[in-house]
Image (cartoon, helix red, strand yellow):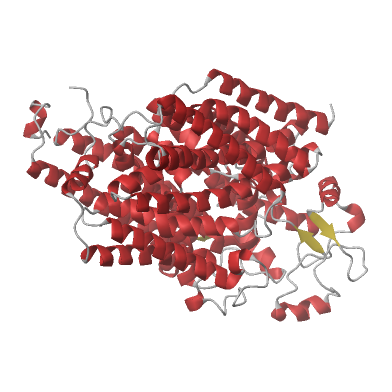
Amino acid sequence: MSQYALNLLVVGASFALYIGIALWARAGSTSEFYAANRGVSPVMNGMATAADWMSAASFISMAGLIATVGYVNSSYLMGWTGGYVLLALLLAPYLRKFGKYTVPDFIGDRFYSSGARLVAVLCLIIISVTYVIGQMTGAGVAFSRFLEVDVTTGLLIGAAVVFVYAVLGGMKGITYTQVAQYIALIVAYTIPAIFISLQLTGNPVPPLGLFSEHTASGQPLLDRLDQVVTDLGFGAYTGMSGSTLNMVLFTLSLMIGTAGLPHVIIRFFTVPKVSDARLSAGWALVFIALLYLTAPAVGAMARLNLLSTIYPEGPQAAALLHEERPNWMRTWEATGLLSWEDKNGDGRIQLYNDRNAAFAETAAERGWNGNELTVNNDIIVLANPEIANLPGWVVALIAAGGLAAALSTAAGLLLAISSAISHDLIKRTINPGISEKGELLAARIAMALAIIVATWLGINPPGFAAQVVALAFGLAAATLFPALMMGIFSKRITSEGAIAGMLAGLVFTCLYIFTYLGWFFIPGTNWLENTPENHIFGIAPTAIGSVGALLNFAVAYGVSAVTKAPPADVQDMVESIRIPRGAQAAAPMH
Amino acid sequence: MSHPSSTSPARPITARPAQEYWSANLRIIGICLAIWALVSFGFGILLRPLLAGIAVGGTDLGFWFAQQGSIITFVALIFFYAWRMNRLDREFGVDEEQS
């Protein structure tokens, strides 16, 4: 069977499974549509949360991001996992006890104000829409690479599948498809990783292999990698570069941002009890850690493997002849993810850091005339099975896994958006008298519209698609997380304080990002060039969310101190969400 | 160890134990978050130069914490918190057992 037919078969089978689950898990009430009737076990919810959370970026791009920079990009690893500690300790159990369906619902009730509710809806929509664009484009790219259809057709197929299970099943359908999608993506990710680890170190466990001996050289793997990359003028893989303050703030932004993402928070509304919400966050992190402990191993090993392929006798000897390059390089040259230009005309592939002035002399002595091989980060994961000479079905699995990662995250985001519209805007603001049936219909229509808008944005991505994820994390960190945390941990924060805090975080974070990336990301409208020398205190726009969060806390406390204390019933509500007992009985109060 | 209230689960929660329960929870959260910050921002970033002498498979302990140790600690912290809070809930008679 050809690789193409195999890819089609595996991806087709996974889609049939998702549709099957959708037909089995139809939602019959708003409680099922918004929160799967609060009947999801903590382990299942952990798995669904892991799929919800791990996006196309985690699956396809993260290992490559770590591979190119090494130690400094550990921020992604710590940031995207450390947020779950904040979620488990500071938000999830209390919001589950509160017993409603959406994030703006809590903010609106706790801050006794439809103004606060609407600001939260606004933040939620900005965060989730920017995030969903990345998922839709990710799904389109995965389709076009593996199934040889054009990006638009691929996107439409993906959107149609999500449409079926999200509109029919709501949270219930999404939960059980996410469980299946988690299994697809983790199997697809780990199998090639195990083989590359075995080849390089003889250790079948990639995270252990990372700290083992490199069999070919007899040196520890990371030692060998440090040596090879510095011999080619790159910074040491395990070395520090750039600003420490920026690394700390970037990590913190990713942590707070993760804990403040609405599509992740609402997953914890689906478990039966408060104690399950705490436990479920632990299981979610276990399932996430399986991928996040593997990714840095894949990154380091794939980079060493690539450099050993190009310099078979070591970086001091001559590079590989282009004629003799392995087959996988030929395959990926066709996709444009890998490209070679023989700048010095010797027919060999020189890969080195030509932007390092100190290395220029060495390069000139060796007759090199610039770096000749351009490698896209994503290839680290996508080409892994071929680099490791694995059978065709593993390649097909990567295709299904990449699509599972993109679609599961997209579905979670779409639910967060549609429930904010049907529940917070329609039921709680515009038409409180709407019937249960009417609200369920509104939720389905909102979901359908959200999918159509997301698909359109995926086909016509705004030019800033690459930057939007940074914005989503920065805004979640600067707006929703502080408001939720203060709402639970302080009885004194007033509606004026919360609204002022959220708006301050929102405006400050957007302004800082726009200063370097252009007004609404329109190229050429940035006020300052986005380089480390221009950043205030060396803080990059991607790291500013944590500063925005601090500002939000400070403004909210300041304004609350000079405004009238919240009414007694709101203070009683805060008392009640701090205590687990009564979670099952907590019926929606209106 | 058993709190006096655990013998009569139906007892209504008066203001004082609720306050004590919350303070105990805040203490546990404080300890967990101190460890959370120590392994990531501490060992993984700021204190890495101090740990440079401790070799771990081709690099140093700080690198290990940044890429693996912090994640493993995070998992352990959440399970510890879930277990400790279940115990605290029972001690104060605020757990969710159907009574």
- The reply to whether residue B52 is visible in this rendering is no
Which quarter of the image is occupied by the C terminus of chain A? top left
Report x, y in % for residue A180. Answer: 57, 28
Q: Point out residue A463 in the picture as x, y percentages from the top left corner.
A: 69, 59
**What residue is shown at x 51% (from left), y 52% (from top)?**
A127
* Residue at the extreme top of the image, as rendered: A24
Locate residue A348 relative to residue A25 in the image: left or right: right
Q: Which picture quadrant has residue A446?
A: top right
Residue in the image at 31% along x and 31% along y: A273
**Vertically, is A198 above or below A273?**
below
Position of A501 relative to A245 (above/below): above
Give percent across and percent down for residue A391. 76, 33
Depth order, front residue of A418/A159: A418
- In the rendered image, residue A156, in percent from the top left (x then y), is placed at 72, 37
The quarter holding residue A385 reads: top right
A351 or A259, nearer to the observer? A259
Q: Residue at 32% across / 58% down in the picture?
A: A498
Residue drawn at x 68%, y 65% as measured from the top left:
A229
Q: Nearer the viewer, residue A306 or A580?
A: A580
Which image quarter is the N terminus of chain A in?
top right
In the image: residue A585, left or right of residue B16: right
Q: Is residue A316 visible?
A: yes
Please state the total of marks drawn on the protein image.
Answer: 0
